[in-house]
Image (tube, helix red, strand yellow):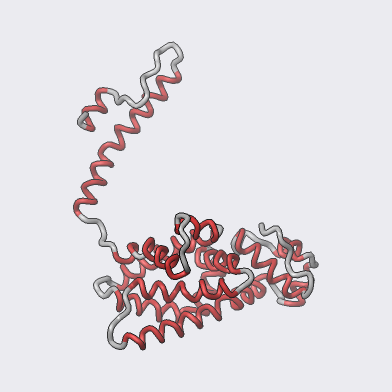
Amino acid sequence: MNSQHPNPGNTRTRLLEAAEALFIEHGYEGMSLRQITGYAEVNLAAVNYHFGSKEALVQELLSAHLDRLNQERLQLLSLCEAQRGDRPMDASAVLSVLFVPAVRLSRESKGGVALMRLLGRVYSDPSPFIRDYLHDHYQFIYGRFFEAFARALPHLSRNELGMRLHFCLKALSGVLAGANMDELISAMCMGEPVNDSQMLARLISFISPMLTTSFESGEQVRDIERVMGMAGAAARSVDERALGEDKASEPRKPQGILPPWAAKVVGV
């Protein structure tokens, strides 16, 4: 958990800061009112007085960060689409519209790293409360972006596009929720000095293939089938080694040498 204590002044602010820190670390179901009030150094009555419930506290926390972010995303998408006229944006450009406002806000905020981790946690948190909140408050914006991706990738069915977007954004959210942003950026940049545009270009290059790469080519399936055909031999070899090691009176088999029957399977 963040070692810094919330703002020592306003109780309402302290509760929001405590809820943010605990939500980032533990998720909605993993934090309790007692933890929040303990972190904020206030009593339980303060939550009821200022918010009424844990649910209302978290809703205000999410609204404070997500309302502005999604308004900027929606406006930026409209501007980019208007600039292109009848030509659809490509998938990478639509992804950049999702990411640029978040990076911009994180740069302007004193808690920029926490903001990025909060976004990762929000979009990866499995709690029905969080899922319902996002659906109820931001479904229109999700719909606008889905249509932008559909125009960018017209060869995909809507079902396949939805599935690809789900995995793409879940994967990204999981990384953001658990990573120190400075370490993540450093790893992506491989020690090179890069600006935000270059950093986002690299990030998008990592995740855009999840939207654009074709499924299950024949060669890929055959490669996987060959590996699957050798998996049983590998498992049996491990079992035989373990059995041999348990028998102290028997000499141990050299590591890395397949038994005769396994060698025949793999064609050695």
**Against 2, is 111 above or below?**
below
Query: Is any atom of residue 135 visible in this view?
Result: yes
**Against 195, is 25 above or below?**
above
Q: Is residue 136 left or right of residue 34?
A: left
Task: Give percent across and percent down for residue 188.
Answer: 45, 58
Q: Is residue 147 left or right of residue 126?
A: left
The image quadrant of residue 240 is: top left
Tell me the residue at 62%/75% (across/down).
Answer: 59
Q: Is residue 139 left or right of residue 231?
A: right
Task: Give percent across and percent down for residue 229.
Answer: 25, 39
Tell me the residue at 75%/66% (across/down).
Answer: 40
The image quadrant of residue 226 is: top left
Tell me the residue at 45%/65% (across/down).
Answer: 199
Query: Is any atom of residue 126 visible in this view?
Result: no
Work out which residue is located at the far front of the displayed protein and give it: 193
Q: Is residue 68 left or right of residue 20?
A: left
Q: Nearer the viewer, residue 99 or 257?
A: 99
The image quadrant where one finds the N terminus is bottom right
